[in-house]
Image (cartoon, helix red, strand yellow):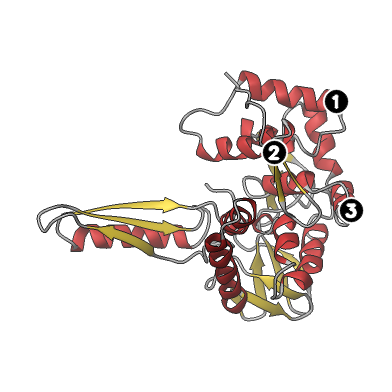
């Protein structure tokens, strides 16, 4: 599972690179996709099998990227390292996404779809709140395109889809009816939704949207503090929970628990005593985000710009 839907590299179904050193040498094909939870990863797997079977000597692999974070990486790398190449590439990608993957949804407004295909059916649009970190939209708002208007629509998505304080993995907007439970994962908040709490907690303190989001998601913060561990799965309609989330869930809650000393200490201790294993990619990624923020390795300002701490040595969990 990966961190978010790829707002950045277009979630292209099969951008691949191939290199051949000689006629007799094997052909290496690396297929880049969006996150494994998205629609493009299985397409990438299918293409990998197709190339492997159809090209003699082909050695194929499928690589899921960091989704929407990827585009921010390009823009911020250009800004921080003063690289026009990165800034230009990030801007061009963002312009293409704005043209091809943004929909003006009746009754809702401009919204980035999870992908070009598979998320619109007649009068219904399927959306994933965790795919649109507010920090990224704040950063993109400085550029031309639909991003400034989208910030308000995204805030509505995050608030309205969590009436009881628990964000869903997926939600459906239906014309004339409004928000509806997802048809595939109705009223489920789990491995996608955990990122919503992470993004909300990492917003700049002076961000105009932060206070409302933290207030809305207090039930999740309070439940985590009470149980000592975030739930793995939540029924967003009833608030009932099942299971204990992996350690990456604890790391994701660190920013939201920053002002609750006891609850914060409990999650820090869990991360220290039970760090993600070598094969726990998703949990490790969440831990890098949450623990890095908790250790003040970076911040986002209200414009969505990354503010890294360049000095100091990172601590380890082992």
Residue 66 drawn above or below residue 123: above
User: For numbered disc 1, what is the local secondary structure?
Assistant: helix
Q: Is residue 177 above or below residue 168?
A: below
Residue topped by disc 1:
261
Disc 2 is placed on an element classified as helix
**Residue 113 occupies quadrant:** bottom right
Q: CA distance from mark 2 to mark 1?
A: 16 Å
Question: What's the residue at 60%, 79% (across, down)?
Answer: 99
* Residue 242 in view (yes/no): no
Q: In terms of sequence position, does the residue under pointer 3 or pointer 1 come before the other?
A: 3
Residue corresponding to mark 3:
212
Q: Nearer the viewer, residue 88 or 262?
A: 88
Q: Circle 2 sits on which residue? A: 252
Q: What secondary structure is found at the residue carrying circle 3?
A: helix
Determine whether 55 is above or below 194 in the image.
below
Q: Residue furthest left?
A: 24
Residue at position x 59%, y 57% from top? 78
Q: Position of residue 132 (x, y in %)?
A: 68, 59
Q: CA distance from mark 2 to mark 3?
A: 19 Å
Residue 44 is left or right of residue 90, and the answer is left
Task: Looking at the image, tell me whether mark 2 or mark 3 is earlier in sequence order.
Answer: 3
For disc 2, the neighbor class at 10 Å (few under 14, some 14 to 19, many from 20) is: many
């Amino acid at each position: 599972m990966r961190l978010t839907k790829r707002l950045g590299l277009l979630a292209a179904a099969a951008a691949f690179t191939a290199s051949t050193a000689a006629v007799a040498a094997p052909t290496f094909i690396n297929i880049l996709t969006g996150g494994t939870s998205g629609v493009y990863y299985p397409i990438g797997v299918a293409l990998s099998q197709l190339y492997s079977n159809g090209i003699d000597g082909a050695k194929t692999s499928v690589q899921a990227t960091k989704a929407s974070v990827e585009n921010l990486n390009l823009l911020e790398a250009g800004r921080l390292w003063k690289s026009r190449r990165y800034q230009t590439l990030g801007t061009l990608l963002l312009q293409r996404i704005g043209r091809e993957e943004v929909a003006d949804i009746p009754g809702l407004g401009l919204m980035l779809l999870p992908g070009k295909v598979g998320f619109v059916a007649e009068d219904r649009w399927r959306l994933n709140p965790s795919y649109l970190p507010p920090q990224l939209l704040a950063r993109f708002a400085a550029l031309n395109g639909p991003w400034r208007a989208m910030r308000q629509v995204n805030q509505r998505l995050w608030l309205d889809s969590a009436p009881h304080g628990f964000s869903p993995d997926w939600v459906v907007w239906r014309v004339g009816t409004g928000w509806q439970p997802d048809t595939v994962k109705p009223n489920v908040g789990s491995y996608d939704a955990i990122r919503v709490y992470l993004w909300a907690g990492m917003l700049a303190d002076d961000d105009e949207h932060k206070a409302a989001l933290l207030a809305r998601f207090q039930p999740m913060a309070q439940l985590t503090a009470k149980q000592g561990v975030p739930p793995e799965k939540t029924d967003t309609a009833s608030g009932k929970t099942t299971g204990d989330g992996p350690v990456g869930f604890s790391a994701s809650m660190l920013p939201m628990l920053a002002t609750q000393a006891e609850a914060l200490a409990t999650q820090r201790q869990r991360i220290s005593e039970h760090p993600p294993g070598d094969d726990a990619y998703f949990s490790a990624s969440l831990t890098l985000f949450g623990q890095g923020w908790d250790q003040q390795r970076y911040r986002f300002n209200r414009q969505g710009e990354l503010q890294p701490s360049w000095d100091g040595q990172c601590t380890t969990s082992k």
